[in-house]
Image: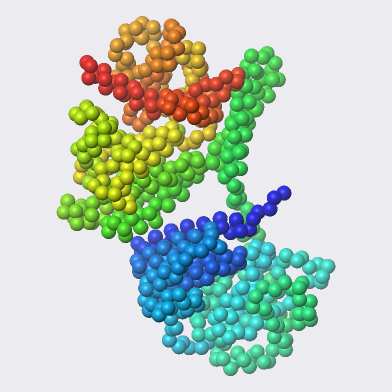
Amino acid sequence: MSSLDPVAVFRTEAAECLEAIEAGLLDLNHDLENKDLVDAVFRGLHTLKGSGAMFGFEALAAFTHHCETAFDRVRKGEVSATAELVAAVLAAQDHMRALVEQPDADHGDAGQKLLTQLQAAVGGKAEANEAAAPVAAASAVAPAAPAKKTTTWRIRFSLPANAMANGTNPLGLLDELRDLGECTVRANTSGIPPLNDLIPTELYVSWEVVLTSEQDRSAIDDVFIFVLDDMELDVQEIAGLQAGVAEAKNETAPVIPVPAAPVAVATAPAAAPEFRPVEAVPVKREAQAPAQAAPQAKAQENVRVPAERLDELMDRVGELVIAQSRLSQLASSSSDIALRSVSEEIERLSGELRDTMMVLRMVPVGTLFSRFRRLVHDLARETGKVIELVTEGETTEVDKTVIERLADPLVHLVRNSIDHGLEPPAERLGAGKTEAGTVTLSARQSGGEVIISITDDGRGINRERVRAKAESSGLIAPGQPLSDQELLQLIFAPGFSTAAQITNLSGRGVGMDVVKKTVDALRGAIEIVSLPGQGSEVSLRIPLTLAIIDGLLVRVGSGRYVIPLSAVEECLELSLEEDLRSRGRSFISLRDSLVPFLRLRDLFRTGTKPDVHQKVVVISTGTERVGLVVDQIIGDHQTVIKSMSKLHNDVATFSGATILGDGSVALILDVGHLVAAGQQQEAQLRVAG
């Protein structure tokens, strides 16, 4: 049985912690007076620092300490939260991520530059020597505060029995208390059972600390902030330092020295006699039991599984579906009732397993949308534009593979909307718009597809510039007639760009080409709507999953093909007489509207005669519809998608293949390509007519 690499686990949890910190910072940037957000960011930085130190990421812990100190000053009201502070910590967060991924790499003076930016954001004065030690930088970030009233506190605390097993180090808590001021620590060992009953992983010791500090009660609570829910903590203020000292002297039990750094008791047997009973601090084991059980049960609700294992399991489920299809075919041709019964049971179980597996692979689109908040924040500062990001439909779920492959295309689309679409504030005000431009990311499910839209309220796409650029680049002939959608789709051509000059955002004409290629590889489609002076909307229509889909199995000539069921609207019968009558026009009348159709027999050049009773399968993508003429509709089919080989990459009619129950191969039709071909045929017929 393989064990998890603790460093790999830390890196995963650190990435989640950094994402939470980034989200808190971006929220805080819109509401700088929100104390809850300040506390949330502080807790995230505190967690990252503590975890980094625990797993040996000392550089990360030391660097994060400065950011934590800055936010601690904000929490205490010494400085105000500002946009500059948020920007400084966001930039520092990128350095933290680098320290997590490459702790031993040479990062140069990047850290010191960020600390200088951070100290400027909190009102500190620049150090005379920028290469000063981290301690000097920390003191620059948090200059000494005026003298405060000294208070003596008595702190009694006990942790759950499973605290150390869950990663909590009591010695670390004591070290943090020492950092607050002068303190005396006593360990209560009365709860330690006889050796035969002792469980090595459980904690039986509680502590009493007398602390003299200039800090207030909140600083003490911050020490226990991450274990407060599961422990017993009693903090009392002692009236004056002398009272605390006198009380300490009157105690009958000796002071127990507690090491400042973690030391295994087993390696220091000489220290064992020092652990003698002292005045008991009540430790209510019975009362703690329910509190301990709740967190443990909660922790078992989620299990972290490597994505590769899900992919492998998905492949196995796909093979099972193919084997089940073959079994069903054999059972249908057999008169054995028992075989048919077993086949139906396996079909039901494999269907449930397939559905469960598909749900496991689904992740909310919000995990993708959240990445763009930082991008928009940085682009707003870079371009000087005022930008508001709005997200809708974050709970819409898509296959994890689709999410991963959509990340880069959406980055290009968002950057394009900000650079080409949104106007500068002065231009927007002159056009009667608000100073802030809005970019909206939305997602919704439509059948077996998810539609992700990027909308802006900017200037819209200049069609004349697009045509002029396309003609000068040789993409179209001068004066070539194009529909509005065909003209707008030219922006996705390789190397196409209308930018006057190359900038960090655009101008090289490679970004939108990447979008087109990725969406095509996902068997998706792109739709564009743009109104001059009002903005643009780019919609990506993407299949919910790339693994197993419900399909409609049809026959054309002697070959069998699969049409994704999510795209099928209805099926009609086309008699031989109607087929002959419609030749030359290829339209059918469907509820007072004409729908173009394609004869797949001619498209695939089967060389066979049409069946007497042909069928028309009406498919659609968005508002566009087209009919596909087939010889026979065989029925529904659970389709396990297999990728086409590299030799067939240029065959746009098919998006993949699947294996049927008899072992033969059926090609999966590319609905988007066929609809586009049908609409193009319709346009040509209308021009000819």
Whether residue 600 is visible to the viewer of this picture, yes or no, is yes
Task: Tell me where residue 405 appears, x and y as whole percent.
Answer: 46, 42
Front residue of 472/461: it is: 472
As drawn, is 403 to the left or to the right of 426?
A: right
Front residue of 302/454: it is: 454
Task: Tell me where residue 166 appears, x and y as whole percent.
Answer: 65, 62
Task: Tell me where residue 614 appears, x and y as whole percent.
Answer: 42, 11
Colouring convention used in this rendered image of the protein: rainbow
As drawn, is 5 to the left or to the right of 621?
A: right
Q: Residue at x 28, y 42 (%)?
A: 497
The image shows residue 422, relative to residue 619, as above or below, that is below
Q: Residue at x 36, y 39 (%)?
A: 513
As drawn, is 172 to the left or to the right of 513?
A: right
The image shows residue 174, relative to residue 242, as above or below, that is above
Q: Residue at x 38, y 27 (%)?
A: 673
Whether residue 118 is visible to the viewer of this picture, yes or no, is no
Residue 161 position by quadrant: bottom right
Image quadrant containing the C terminus? top left
Q: Residue at x 25, y 43 (%)?
A: 498
